[in-house]
Image (cartoon, rainbow, N blue to C red):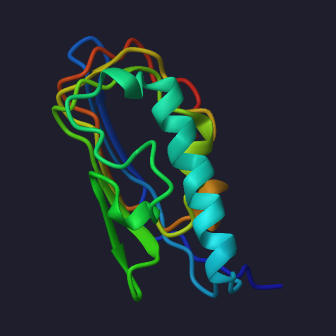
Amino acid sequence: MALPWRLVTLLLVTWIRGSCVFCLVGRRENRTPMTANGIESLQRRALHALWKDAGGDRWANADKWTSSDRVCTWYGTTCTNGGSKITEIDLSFNRLEGSIARLFWTLPFLQKVNLRGNHLTHHGFNGLTMENASTAPLEWVDLTENSLVDIRGVS
């Protein structure tokens, strides 16, 4: 039986004490279609979890993150496919602190994440697994210039 997805790349380079983590994880093909409302709801829950766990009320720029506006209009999000599917998050140098919510890694169309230059200290990688590569096409993560103490949870 063939798997519905194919892993493209796994690369993890890490300097724990130097706070450098760069990952290329995987890509899924043959995704099950979701409704537009279902996609929006799922993305909103994942981003709200990040907001809560990474001190969103203290971010340098959090434009629309507490609004009822479509998530594709929120600061740091980039969307494709008619503006409804988040493919990139760039919250670099934005004063995030604490951890990355596990739910964040379940964004179904996320390809690139840039959280460079923040104050993330907790691993927050539970949920970032090769199994998740079957649910998200995540290809690139930049967590350099943070204060990470470990990367437990990446598998």
Residue at the (54%, 41%) spot, across then down: 48
Depicted 101 relative to depicted 55: above or below = below
Residue 120 in which image quadrant: top left
Residue found at x 32% / y 18%: 16
Q: Residue at x 65, y 62 (%)?
A: 41
Position of residue 24 in the picture relative to residue 67 (left or right):
left
Residue 103 x/y as whole percent:
62, 43
Write the residue at 63% across / 55% down. Answer: 132
Q: Position of residue 123 (x, y in %)?
A: 48, 22
Residue 19, compared with residue 134, is above or below; it is: above
Q: Is residue 34 left or right of residue 78?
A: right
Instruction: For the C terminus, give its image quadrant.
Output: top right
The reply, left or right, for residue 133 in relation to residue 89 is right
The correct choice, above or below, for 32 with respect to 150 in the image is: below
The foreground one among 154 and 112 is 112
- Residue 150, given in percent of the width and then of the height, sits at 44, 17
Q: Is residue 102 above or below residue 145?
A: below
The residue most toward the right is: 1
Judge whether residue 128 can be spotted in this image: no
Q: Is residue 62 visible?
A: yes
The count of marks equals 0
Q: Looking at the picture, how far across and down is residue 30, in whole percent?
A: 63, 87
Image quadrant containing the N terminus? bottom right
